[in-house]
Image (cartoon, rainbow, N blue to C red):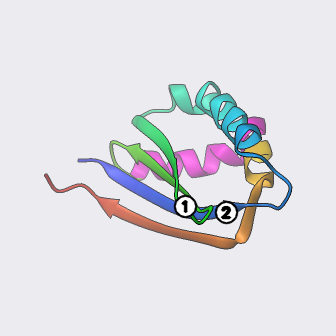
Amino acid sequence: MEYIEMAKFKLKDGLTDEQFIESEKSVRNGLIKNQKGFISRELSKDKDGFWLMDMRFDNNENMDTWFEILKQDPTMKILGSMIDFSTVRMEFFTKKI
């Protein structure tokens, strides 16, 4: 059963999509790729400048473990520094079928 995090946000002023995408590529090639239960991480962007990050793990426990590990991941610190946290909205889901 997959556990899904959906995060919607905008970038801080002055950052380009390309800068953010390069940072995301570093995250994907970093600690997360070997994280137990990791399935996928996808980014999309809407016409109003909001990004949507869809991250999937095999269960809630493995995602929670990642949330602890990411605090030590230098690639996640760089990516996080690009996000305007006043715009962040996060939701969590469990896949049913």
Say what amino acid the circle numbered 1 marks: Lys
85 versus 59 height, above or below: below
Q: Quadrant of residue 9?
A: bottom right
Residue 35 placement, left or right of 2: right
Q: Position of residue 54 (x, y in %)?
A: 45, 50
Please give the residue where the numbered disc 1 appears in the rendered image. 47
Bounds of the magenta segment: 61-76
Q: Quadrant of residue 92?
A: bottom left
Q: Residue, x 24% and y 55% (percent of image)?
A: 95
Q: Residue, x 54% and y 64% (percent of image)?
A: 8
26 versus 89 height, above or below: above
Q: Residue furthest left?
A: 97
Find the distance from the CA under tag 1 to the CA under tag 2: 12 Å
28 versus 14 height, above or below: above
Q: Is residue 73 magenta?
A: yes
Residue 54 placement, left or right of 94: right
Q: Is residue 50 magenta?
A: no
27 versus 59 height, above or below: above
- Callout 1: helix, strand or loop? loop
Q: Residue, x 66% and y 38% (percent of image)?
A: 21
- Callout 2: helix, strand or loop? strand
Q: Position of residue 6 (x, y in %)?
A: 45, 59
Q: Position of residue 97 (x, y in %)?
A: 13, 52
Viewer-proximal residue among 50 and 56: 50
Viewer-proximal residue among 4 and 16: 16
Q: Residue furthest front?
A: 47
Q: Position of residue 35 (x, y in %)?
A: 51, 32
Q: Residue, x 45% and y 33% (percent of image)?
A: 36
Please give the residue where the numbered disc 2 appears in the rendered image. 10
